[in-house]
Amino acid sequence: MEVIIQPCAAAAADLVARLLAARLRRTPALVLGLATGRTMEAVYARLIALHRDEQLDFSHCTTFNLDEYAGLAGDQPGSYRRYMQEHLFDHININTRRTHLPDGTAPDLAAECAAYEQRIEQSGGIDLQLLGIGASGHIGFNEPLSALMSRTREKALTPLTRAQNAFAFGGDPARTPARALTMGVGTILAAREIILLATGRAKAAIIAKAVEGPITAMISATALQLHPCCKVLVDADAATLLTETDYYRWIFDHEPEWAPFR
């Protein structure tokens, strides 16, 4: 795991976008794992700008999103399919047939989850997985006590998660779906590269636990410590409770792989 600290949220999101763009230019048929949420909006806005201004090409890539709410159709407000269309897909030259999200309205949700795993495998696996982190430390919707070897499945959402996501449902946690389909922790760890983005002081405590705390099923993001190629991108506010910030900054300033991005 590498931790990269940027001075502000905009700089952190910009670096994530530039990393994604670099991977896409190197491998046009990249298989991308995508995330949703307010933190990601700045990343997607930057990718749209790179497509518009620098002709960043998405026409050959394939995407798989982490999750979708159970019982919510893709065209409904609050759905992650609608989020992705509005914040990214409608603004770039991506083939929508290569954009995948779990179907929260499938008649057999267990079968849909198994089929989603199969679609990922048939695409050759995820090359680069983008992640955010929830207030409880979840990645995807892998709530506390999610098995670290879990695969795509249906999960009940905690009250904390529903409150955190209520902004998409008129600010009312009671209107936020109580269940979702999500990639498992094991599915996420199978990606060849992982980039987690977290910004803001409200994420400082959970980032410190995820990065420097013990690995535990209570905080699914701690499993990322096991991944051989995971990068955690944070702004200065989200880094305030980390204990090794001098070392993390030294790595970014001196490691050759980061030279093109400094």
Image: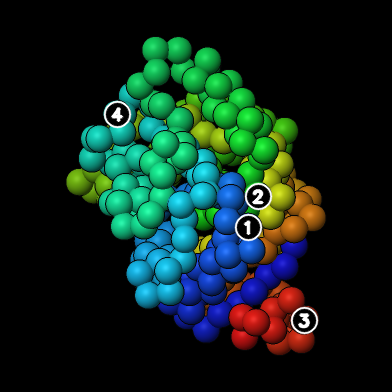
Amino acid tagged 4: Ala
- Among numbered discs 1 and 4, the one appearing first in the sequence: 1
Q: Secondary structure at mark 1?
A: loop
- Among numbered discs 2 and 1, the one appearing first in the sequence: 1
Where is mark 1, residue-wise?
27
Amino acid tagged 3: Pro
Where is mark 2, residue-wise?
127
Residue 73, label in figure: 4
Distance in Å between CA atoms under marks 2 and 4: 27 Å
From the viewer's perspective, tell me whether residue 43 is left or right of residue 221. Answer: left
For the image shown, how many numbered marks are present on the structure?
Answer: 4
Q: Quadrant of the N terminus?
A: bottom right
Q: Secondary structure at mark 4?
A: loop
From the viewer's perspective, tell me whether residue 78 is left or right of residue 235. Answer: left
Location of residue 29 with respect to 175 vertically, above or below:
below
- Among numbered discs 4 and 3, the one appearing first in the sequence: 4
Distance in Å between CA atoms under marks 2 and 1: 10 Å
Along the viewing direction, whichever of 256 and 184 lies nearer the viewer? 256
